[in-house]
Image (spheres, rainbow, N blue to C red):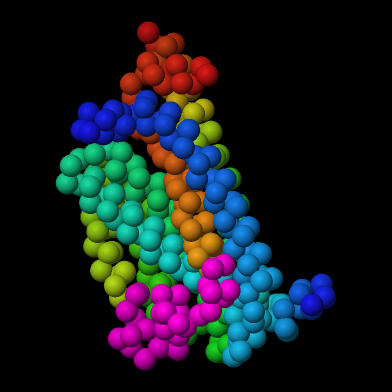
Amino acid sequence: MNLADFFNMGGYAAFVWPAFGLVMSVLVYNVWSARSAHAEARRAAARRLQMEENRS
Amino acid sequence: MWTWFHKLASPPHFYRIAGKVIPWFSWPALLLILLGLYGGLVVAPMDYQQGEGFRIFYVHVPSAIMSMFVYSNMAIAAGIGLIWRMKLAHAVAAASAPIGAWFTFCALATGSLWGKPMWGTWWVWDARLTSELILLFLYLGFIALRSSIEDPQRADRAAAVLALVGVINLPIIHYSVVWWNSLHQGSTMFNPGAMSIEMKWPALAMLFGFMLYFGAVLFVRLRAEVIRRERNATWLKEELAR
């Protein structure tokens, strides 16, 4: 099997590649969004602590 | 045992332990998913009926199984949270929802991409497809309900009730291909003899990879939830200073 055949997927390229691409992008996006939620929670907590400190 | 359990459920401990276990999930997950991709796209022989088009199977079926697996996980956590008033359990439910919603979206979208060449249509209002779409709405409803209630404890409880009521949809999805005349094919993954070994192992690798991936992302989201819910400043201050 050569590379062109592989990318052609027996004529189903227009369906197979978007399906795999979509799922892999969703997986990457989920990691990114979870990590940024964690970073944002840390920033928000730091702000909250700072405000409490200023008040006292 | 119980003291160990209570210690684990205490926010500072949980936060630190969760941070340590994440790589134990994420690296095997990455390896298994890469293995599943290689196996599914290169090693597995093509299907005698569907040709190379059947390879969508390797992302569609694991996503669909995950959409239901994550929902059961979320509902069990929500139930534990309701009965024992455990905040960490509610946090697990809250952290699961977006991941599950994305897996459901993947199952629907890849199913659509598979349906077009095989059935000649992107979508039919058939029992399997419709019940899976309802699952997506249940996840979105759970997320929307949580964010619409200001008080976190009331939000936890209301969303937990919704999650538990939605469990009724899981057997409907699973048995939809048996109970109704469906365009969707029956289960091949758990039907012994339906698939050869070299066709099956990439799907199993992908499925276990997705499960470990879910564990890793869940723990990252849980750490965010723990910080968001924490009001005891001392350990947070120490943790943030690191």
Q: Quadrant of the N terminus of chain B?
A: top left
Residue sitting at x 62%, y 70%: B40
**B161 relative position to A41: left or right:** left
Question: x, y percentage for residue A23?
Answer: 59, 63
**A8 relative position to B49: left or right:** right
Decide: is B213 above or below B137: above
In terms of image quadrants, where is residue B167? bottom left
Residue sitting at x 33%, y 24%: B231
Residue sticking out furthest to the top: A56
Segment colored magenta: B173-202
Total count of labels: 0
Decide: is B164 above or below A4: above
Q: Nearer the viewer, residue B36 or B180?
A: B36
Question: x, y percentage for residue A22?
Answer: 62, 64
Question: x, y percentage for residue B28?
Answer: 55, 49
Q: Nearer the viewer, residue B189 or B186?
A: B189
Residue B194 shown in magenta: yes
Question: x, y percentage for residue B82?
Answer: 20, 47
Residue B47 shown in magenta: no
Q: Does the image show residue B185?
A: yes
Decide: is A16 above or below B3: below
In terms of image quadrants, where is residue B100? bottom left
In terms of image quadrants, where is residue A9? bottom right
Residue sitting at x 36%, y 27%: B13
Q: Nearer the viewer, residue A31 or B161?
A: A31
Q: Does the image show residue B228?
A: no
